[in-house]
Amino acid sequence: MGIYPITATDQDAIDTIKILNLNTPKLKGLRGKVIAGLIYQDRSEREFIPIQDAQRLLTTYEHYNLDNTRGYLPEFLSAIIYLLRLLSGK
């Protein structure tokens, strides 16, 4: 089980985000920068990383998820893994 993107119709998720104040401009920007830094190979964010790179990163982050000695938040790892799976075709 992991964390997956929500839809505009997922009212429980929308309410939780609002209650926890997780949708501030600052947090939105930080999340976006982290994800962009992983999945794009250029600063203009027009070219995704090659499939082989996505597969390598996926293996790495799946390992981090199993052996979380680096202190990553499980929810954050799940979101990254989800996106890398999309990019790698897995």
Image (tube, helix red, strand yellow):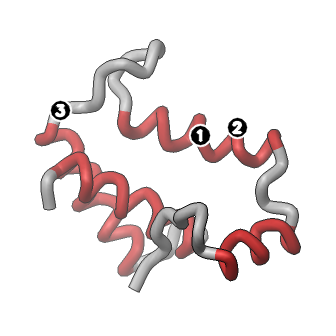
SS at mark 1 in the image: helix
Q: Quadrant of the N terminus?
A: bottom left
Residue under label 3: 50
SS at mark 2 in the image: helix
- Mark linked to residue 64: none
SS at mark 3 in the image: loop
Q: Amino acid at mark 1?
A: Gly
Tell me which label, 1 or 3, sits earlier in the chain.
1
Q: Amino acid at mark 3?
A: Pro
Residue, x 33% and y 23% (percent of image)? 41
Q: Quadrant of residue 72?
A: bottom right
- Contact (Cβ within 8 Å) of mark 2 with mark 1: yes
On the question of residue 72 being in view, the answer is no
Rendered view: 42 above or below 22 = above
Q: Toward the viewer: 72 or 17?
A: 17
Q: Give the distance between the C-alpha atoms of the residues marked 2 and 3, in whole angstroms.
A: 24 Å
Q: Toward the viewer: 77 or 68?
A: 77
Residue 69 position, x and y percent, is: 50, 74
Horizontal arrangement in the rendering, residue 21 relative to residue 6 (left or right): right
Q: Toward the viewer: 45 or 9?
A: 9
Tell me which label, 2 or 3, sits earlier in the chain.
2
Q: Quadrant of the C terminus?
A: bottom left
Residue, x 83% and y 49% (percent of image)? 24
Q: Quadrant of residue 38?
A: top left
Horizontal arrangement in the rendering, residue 58 relative to residue 42 (left or right): left
Residue under label 2: 29
Q: Amino acid at mark 2?
A: Gly
Residue 56 position, x and y percent, is: 20, 50
Residue under label 1: 32
Residue 35 position, x and y percent, is: 49, 43
Query: Dot 3, crowdedness within 10 Å: few (<14), some or many (≥20)?
Result: few
